């Protein structure tokens, strides 16, 4: 899968044009894109990137990718990011890297949203855990509310004790309901639960999404 991720990331980086503002997502496939983008910058490409996480910002600085913020630009030319799952409608589950709230803002601000994936991320029906960013004060309420219809767990750190904390200072929870029969309705419900900053279901960007799977442009209707 690493070669498929590299191919997708490199293909996306090669679609970037001079003077573009790029929204840079978070995750392993995006890192390959950044690797190729840094090569192109060293060859003379002039771009600015807006990172979606501290991790992406650190990597971008290490690679020499110039950065700016949303406050510095009027819009983003291309957002480039991965996904946990993608269905035939180009509806997504995102947030395995706990950056989905910032990623949604960047995607909403962009003219085009390149979603770079390997084949394992393509599904007929979304059914994976849905990442939830929740304010610490509301965690008890949110877990009680969502447990009525599914399974909700506080995500715990791998190299730290206790819960995973987002770059915004909130808790990350994972919500599972099995096969999601109506992703749009579930997204609206989850984002309206008091205390939820944002869920990882994203159904609103289909018209601007271009899927790049293993290096091939796979845009669908």
Image (tube, rainbow, N blue to C red):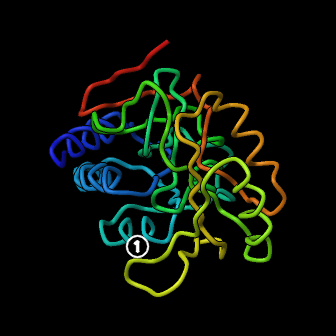
Q: Give the residue at x 58% y 72%.
A: 167
Q: Give the residue at x 43% y 24%.
A: 124
- Residue 66 percent across, percent down from the top left: 43, 62
Residue under pointer 1: 58
Kind of element beneath mark 1: helix
Q: Is residue 186 above or below residue 42?
A: above
List the single residue furthest toward the top.
221
Q: Is residue 155 above or below residue 110?
A: below
Q: Give the residue at x 36% y 39%.
A: 116
| Tally of numbered discs | 1
Q: Nearer the viewer, residue 209 or 198?
A: 198
- Residue 134 percent across, percent down from the top left: 70, 65
Q: Is residue 188 left or right of residue 153?
A: right
Q: Counting other residues with Cα less than 10 Å from the Cα at mark 1, is it few (<14), some (14-19), or many (20 or more)?
A: few
Q: Quadrant of the N terminus?
A: top left
Is residue 102 visible from the viewing direction of this image? no
Q: Nearer the viewer, residue 183 or 16?
A: 183
Is residue 190 visible from the viewing direction of this image? yes
């Amino acid at each position: 899968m690493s070669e498929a991720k590299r191919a997708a990331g490199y293909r996306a980086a090669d679609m970037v044009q001079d003077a573009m503002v790029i929204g840079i997502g978070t995750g392993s496939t995006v890192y390959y894109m950044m690797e190729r983008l840094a090569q192109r910058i060293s060859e003379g490409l002039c771009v600015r990137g807006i990172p979606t996480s501290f991790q992406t910002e650190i990597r971008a600085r290490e690679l020499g990718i110039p950065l700016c913020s949303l406050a510095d630009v009027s819009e983003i030319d291309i957002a480039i990011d991965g996904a946990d799952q993608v269905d035939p409608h180009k509806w997504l589950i995102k947030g395995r890297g706990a950056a989905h709230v910032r990623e949604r803002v960047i995607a909403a601000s962009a003219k085009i949203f390149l979603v770079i994936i390997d084949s394992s991320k393509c599904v007929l029906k979304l059914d994976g855990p849905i990442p939830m960013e929740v304010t610490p004060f509301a965690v008890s309420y949110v877990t009680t509310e969502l447990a009525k219809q599914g399974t909700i767990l506080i995500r715990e750190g791998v190299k730290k004790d206790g819960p995973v904390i987002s770059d915004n200072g909130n808790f990350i929870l994972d919500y599972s309901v099995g096969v999601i029969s109506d992703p749009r309705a579930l997204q609206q419900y989850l984002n309206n639960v008091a205390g939820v900053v944002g869920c990882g279901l994203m159904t609103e960007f289909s018209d601007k999404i271009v899927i790049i799977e293993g290096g091939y442009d796979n845009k669908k209707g």
